[in-house]
Amino acid sequence: MKIIVALALLAVAVLAYECPPDPTQGIDCFETEPGKVFCMTDGSLVCGVCGKRLAYCLGMMEGLLILESIDPSVCEGATAPECEQGISGPKIKG
């Protein structure tokens, strides 16, 4: 039973990060954390969940798996982007 639950959670995670054929043209994304900065495993800093998703999709195009890092020291020295503040909602990032 635990295996089924784990597989279901994995399937949901994969579908949540489904990428368009060409993410360089932008992605459709519902932004829920517009002002939050995330550290990614490639050492970059991105804004919001849409930024995380875009980084993931662009990485997949290059054969790289770029996810949110659990180790903030990975992004030490990276320049923080200016993130939009305000109401969350649908965004197209590119």
Image: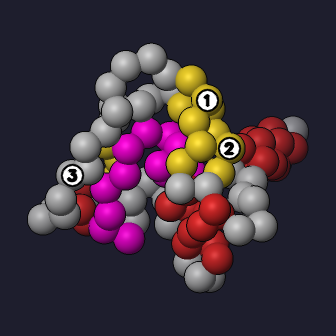
Q: Secondary structure at mark 2?
A: strand
Separation of residues labelled 3 and 1 (CA atoms)? 23 Å
In three-dimensional space, the C-alpha distance between marks 2 and 1, rounded to whole angstroms, equals 8 Å
**Neighbour tally class for label 2: few under 14, some 14-19, many 20 plus, Cα within 10 Å:** some
Residue 66 or residue 47, whichever sits in front: 47
Dot 3: element: loop
For the residues bearing labels 2 and 1, Cβ distance under 8 angstroms: yes
Residue type at the position of mark 3: Ala
Q: Which mark sits nearer the N-terminus, 3 or 2?
A: 2
Q: Is residue 51 magenta?
A: yes
Indicate whether 70 appears above or below 16: below
Q: Position of residue 41 (x, y in %)?
A: 39, 65
Which residue in the protein does label 3 denote?
A: 80
Q: Residue 65 is drawn in which quadrant?
A: bottom right
Query: Could you say which is closer to the camera, residue 92 or residue 4?
Result: 92
Magenta-drawn segment: 42-53
Q: Which residue is mark 2?
A: 28
Say if residue 13 shows up in the picture: no
Residue under numbered circle 1:
90
- Which corner quadrant of the image does residue 16 belong to? top right
Circle 3 packing at 10 Å, graded few (<14), some (14-19), many (20+), is: some
Relative to 49, residue 81 above or below: below
Q: Tag count in the figure?
A: 3
Report if residue 31 is visible in the image. yes
Left or right position of 29 against 69: right
Residue sitting farthest toward the bottom: 62
Disc on the earlier residue, 2 or 1? 2
**Residue 54: image x %, image y %?**
55, 56
Determine the residue positioned at 37% across, 19% down: 86
Rendered location of residue 62, percent (x, y): 59, 82
Q: Is residue 43 above or below residue 83?
A: below
Q: Image point 63% across, 62% down: which residue? A: 25
